[in-house]
Image (tube, grey):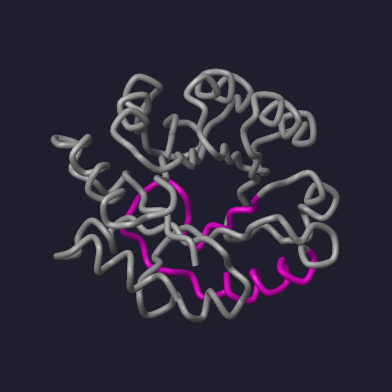
Amino acid sequence: MLVAPSVLSADFGKLAGEVQAICDAGCDLVHVDVMDGHFVPNLTIGPVVVESIAKASTKPLDIHLMVQNNTFFVELFAPLKPAYISFHLEEEKHPHRLIQKIKSYGIKASVVLNPNTLPEEVEFLIEDLDMVLLMSVNPGFGGQSFIPSVLKKARRLKKMRDVLNPNCLIEVDGGVNEKNVLELKEAGVDVVVAGSYVFKHDSYKKAVDSLRV
């Protein structure tokens, strides 16, 4: 299991140190939630702060856009060269075009599905995707409880992925901890995003290690 701590739950008063700490703890990706206050009722960070995160990080960035006007934000963050940029399918009228745009920057493309969005919605996109991110909470705020139905959703997505694009990763974000990570692994999940669980733990390394099933 790959582990991507979400800096949304970090102490922003010492953000560079927090990013360095999770990298030292052995995470695989640094997950960055970008919210615009329109697609979700929360406002987080822009490119200036994400640039500082990139400078502090020794691990690749995994940028999750929770925004309207995805193309604008892709163009805004692409110069930072994250490993992944994820956008919500619910907010994009031309997802295939945007996937190709992300890839044109040499960045891996990922689509996000809200808890109530069917996995079959990506059937005709998945061959072009590097990752599909399943939300296991409603997007917008950290610290929410895990929605168990994402396990069934992950299993359905895995069957589709294994046939159409075995190289496409499945990522889950929201309420992930040491109690549900094994079930996620068994459902076919490759990457877990964990915010509160990691940053509220006494030891970031122990938290990361406990998710590596």
Q: Is residue 62 left or right of residue 210?
A: right
Q: Please say whether residue 50 is one of the residues in the magenta stretch.
A: no
Foreground: 159 or 108? 108
Q: Please say whether residue 139 is one of the residues in the magenta stretch.
A: yes
- Residue 7 is drawn in which quadrant? top left
Q: Is residue 100 left or right of residue 147?
A: right
- The residue positioned 68% from the left and 47% from the top of the image is 130
Foreground: 115 or 178? 178
- Residue 115 is drawn in which quadrant? bottom right
Question: Residue 32, how many percent across, how many down?
Answer: 41, 40
Above or below, 182 against 98 in this view is below
Task: Identify the magenta region.
Answer: 131-160
Question: Residue 45, how many percent across, how many down?
Answer: 35, 29
Above or below, 152 against 161 in this view is below
- The residue positioned 78% from the left and 67% from the top of the image is 162
Image quarter hosting the C terminus: bottom left
- The residue positioned 29% from the left and 64% from the top of the image is 197
- The residue positioned 34% from the left and 19% from the top of the image is 48
Foreground: 203 or 180? 203
Q: Is residue 177 left or right of residue 121?
A: left
Q: Is residue 42 left or right of residue 20?
A: right
Above or below, 186 against 28 in this view is below
Question: Residue 18, how many percent across, how many down?
Answer: 21, 44
